[in-house]
Amino acid sequence: MNTIEHYIDGAFVASTSGNTSPVFNPATGDVIAEVGLANIDEVDAAIAAAKAALPGWRATSLARRSEILFAFRNLVIEHKDEIAAALTAEHGKVLSDSAGEIQRGIENIEFACGIPELLKGSFSEQVSTGIDVFEIRQPVGVVAGITPFNFPAMVPMWMYPNAIACGNTFVLKPSEKDPSVNNIVARLWTEAGLPAGVFNVVQGDRVAVERILDHPDVAAVSFVGSTPIAKSIYATAAANGKRVQALGGAKNHMIVLPDAEMEGAADAAISAAYGSAGERCMAISVAVAVGSAGDALVKAIEERIPGVTVGDGTNPASEMGPLITGEHRDKVAGYLTSGAEQGATVVVDGRNMEFDLNGFFLGPSLLDNVTTDMDAYKDEIFGPVLSIIRVDTYEEAVQLINDNPYGNGTAIFTRDGGAARRFQFEVEAGMVGINVPVPVPVAAYSFGGWNSSAFGDTHIYGKEGVHFYTRTKVVTSRWPDPGTSNIDLGFPTNT
């Protein structure tokens, strides 16, 4: 049985804690590896390595940092298939989804390659007689990332490219459910020329998380996960004097107006609700059908669901893979039971699909006539269950979204430019799509929700990521006038 190790100070290190966790192939249900879970001493060793590497990396020129980032970017592209295969083996998502995830991560590496431009400060001459003022950005120190199972390659790439480019050193605690991807990444960082200790991977569970939050040498923490844990991460890390960006859960709505191009809206709902088996914080969980759009939308989605091929992620024909664990699959399936009991109509029941493998599969499912008091609406399902809520007006639809405690992403489908502009102005969410079902921002912008979907100082990646991983320093300076100073500055006497 392969045991997945830590990566500390430029080398793979076996855990000595004696605690391990199984790593499954979700398509077969088989245990394919085990991961050693760090104890406090192993977390401390990773943080100590990052602290020791900090002075040298902080002093490294922007040109050299950029050179290493470009080399790393090229290596990730070169090894994209290897990373995608490891991702699919442990997460279960289809290979095309894995490749797409890595590509979106590469965009963030490419953004960070421009660090000489991104770290530019500002300068004001002669703010007072003989006095200049300028502002510079400097790294915050040792920073950490705690990342979820659903995007084991991309989400860490939201963090460490900017953090490292800004001159920080990084300790990553990935999910123990699919831990191998970031050991491949660590190897590529070393091949790219990154000094030992600048990037470290600690495999672990709650013990590792709690030590990262408590450790006095960790200056900042980035987190992506569920809302209850994000809130706890934020409270604990902030109480310990750390900078925090903690992204939580979501309940993303997609409004479909009667004038929408219904076939396109149904296609969008299929990809947004069932892509990656619905295990993504930007998945559309609720379609809000306005007025006469309801029957047509439900019919169009129902007709498309049988065309979604569910199977082993390594099969090129598969369009949706299994869920991450059997326990999670059963929890998601439970919303079909509770939905029916609470009055929803089960239009398509994914539990009725038959599969060739004994993995953690659940077919795409559709609930109609869902109301806001049902569990299927109130909870973040994080699986391939799409709920349809019917309302009479646009105003009701927007109010529904704004009343929801989450505010991650949302979308509207319409041909009316005025309605679209009004929606982007009125809706209370951090990311908005107009005829775009999954409005994940490109790398030059920042990812983040509102309300209970985000806690902390800034959103993640993009310019806000650069701001999070740096502190500003303002310098006010006065220099003696060469014409009046008694100090010999070496200027010719006739100047």
Image (cartoon, grey):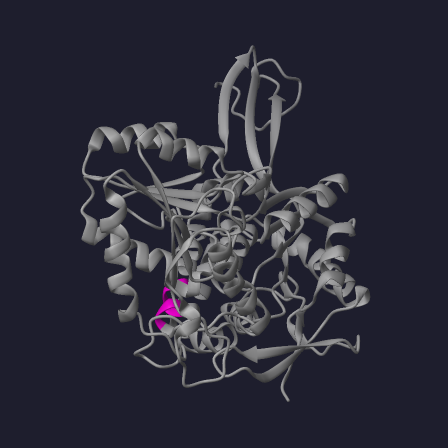
- Report the predominant secondary structure element of the magenta stretch: helix
User: Which residue is painted at 61% across and 65% down in the image?
Assistant: 175
Give x and y (percent) for residue 283.
42, 54
User: Which residue is painted at 59% across and 84% down in the image?
Assistant: 31
* Boundaries of the magenta span: 96-102
Give x and y (percent) for residue 302.
28, 61
Does the stretch in magenta take in 32? no
Q: Is residue 207 left or right of residue 326?
A: right
Up the image or down, 157 lies above or below 141; here it is: below
User: Which residue is painted at 55% across and 48% down in the image?
Assistant: 166
Q: Quadrant of the N terminus?
A: bottom right
State whether residue 340 appears in this view: yes
Up the image or down, 133 lies above or below 410; here it is: above
Outermost residue, top side: 129
Considering depth in this image, is 495 or 147 the residue closer to the camera? 147
Considering depth in this image, is 481 or 38 the residue closer to the camera? 38
Up the image or down, 125 lies above or below 67; here it is: above
